[in-house]
Image (spheres, rainbow, N blue to C red):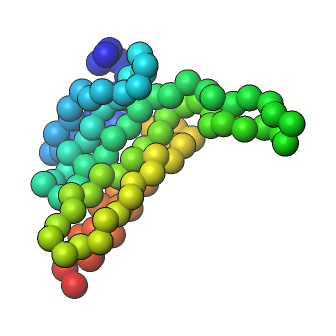
Amino acid sequence: MAKRTFTKIRKWAEENGYKIEETWAYGDQDAIRVIVSEKQSFKLEVRKSTIYMSIRGQRGDAGGLYLTEELKREEGEPYRRNYAFHQASQRVAIESMESDIKQLAKRIAQ
């Protein structure tokens, strides 16, 4: 996995003191994990397009950057399924991560 990928995200994580970890992704796709805390991390991966035309129209997912929030489950907390969402750019992904970090901090403070 090339360290040339995710340059804006790597810089943002470094500036905020978050740990970056190279991680596994399906196929030969690039992926990293941004570890914010013991409870919260984010997986970012560059995926290839799976879009195809079917009888019912276009199917599949667009290629590009995908972001998954990973929350550590605690005892008594219901299982929370995390989905990967397509991001328009690294800047948009950073804004999404910042929002999720703030939301978790609010939930913990309550």
- Give x and y (percent) for residue 48: 55, 24
Q: Which residue lies furthest to the bottom in this view?
A: 110
**Percent position of residue 96, x then y:** 43, 54
Residue plotted at (50% across, 47% down): 85
**Picture quarter with the C terminus:** bottom left
> Residue 79 versus residue 44: which sits nearer the camera?
79
Where on the picture, by quarter, is residue 43? top left
Relative to residue 12, is residue 60 drawn left or right? right
Where does residue 26 sit, x and y in percent of width and height? Answer: 41, 25
Residue 95, placed above or below residue 63:
below
Q: Could you say which is closer to the camera, residue 12 or residue 20?
A: 20
Foreground: 110 or 72?
72
Q: Residue at x 17, y 67 (%)?
A: 74
Reply above or below: 90 against 79: above
Q: Which residue is drawn at 52% across and 38% down?
A: 89
Write down the quadrant of residue 86 in the picture: top right
Number of marks in the rendered image: 0
Where, quadrant-wise, is the N terminus in this rendering? Answer: top left
- Picture layout, residue 85 above or below residue 110: above
- Depicted 26 relative to depicted 13: above or below: above
Name of the residue lying farthest toward the right: 55
Residue 92 visible to an observer of this rendering: no
Where residue 39 appears, as percent x and y from the top left, is 18, 58
Q: Is residue 99 visible?
A: yes
